[in-house]
Amino acid sequence: MTDSKNRDQSSGQAWFMLLLASIFEVGYALSVGGSQAFTVPLWSAVALLFFLLTLYFLSAALRTIDVGVGYAVWAGIGSVGAAVFGSVLLDQPLTMVQSFWLAVIIAGVVWLKLADSEKLKAVAQAQGLIG
């Protein structure tokens, strides 16, 4: 396997781990609400489990992905997921204005992922846009 293929595979695995960390972050946010300030033992245990999983997968992903980009993507997916699932599962309000800004966060996350693409970097380098 070439270095380029190894980098692509490693990067793909890191982004998958970041996605898992983000999903666990949503689970953590929702279960913390269910724990009622950690007074409900079952929900508290679930929150702790999600917290440990999100930390593990986030730290694993950040071995490959730059910290600033990885953290922004993780926080963005976590924020959007918590808002959407909080609205659907917990009957929390979600206004049109909030939905618009959540869409902006999603667009930012997509662009951050695209900016990490090796092919995009190669094209930008060939055009002299980056060094």
Image (cartoon, rainbow, N blue to C red):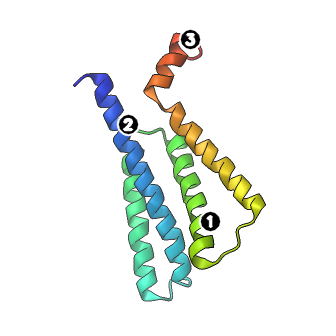
- Gap between marks 3 and 2, in whole Å? 23 Å
Identity of the residue drawn at 55% across and 54% down: 77
Instruction: First in sequence, mark 3 or 2: give its number.
Output: 2
Kindly indicate the quadrant of the structure image that contains residue 20. bottom left
The numbered dot on residue 83 is 1
Q: Classify the position of the N terminus by image quarter.
A: top left
35, above or below 78, in the image: below
Identity of the residue drawn at 76% across and 61% down: 96
Residues packed near mark 2 inside 10 Å, few (<14), some (14 to 19) or many (20 plus): some
Which amino acid type is shown beneath numbered disc 3? Answer: Gln
Q: Disc 3, disc 1: CB below 8 Å?
A: no
Tag 3's secondary structure? loop
- Gap between marks 3 and 1, in whole Å? 40 Å
| Residue assigned mark 2 | 11
- Gap between marks 1 and 2, in whole Å? 28 Å
Tag 2's secondary structure? helix
79, above or below 92, in the image: above
Kindly indicate the quadrant of the structure image that contains residue 51. bottom left
Identity of the residue drawn at 56% across and 11% down: 127
| Residue assigned mark 3 | 127
Kindly indicate the quadrant of the structure image that contains residue 5. top left
Tag 1's secondary structure? helix
Give x and y (percent) for residue 62: 42, 44
Instruction: First in sequence, mark 1 or 2: give its number.
Output: 2
Which amino acid type is shown beneath numbered disc 2? Answer: Ser
Which amino acid type is shown beneath numbered disc 1? Answer: Ala
Looking at the image, residue 87 sits to the left or right of residue 19; the answer is right
55, above or below 15, in the image: below
Residues packed near mark 1 inside 10 Å, few (<14), some (14 to 19) or many (20 plus): many
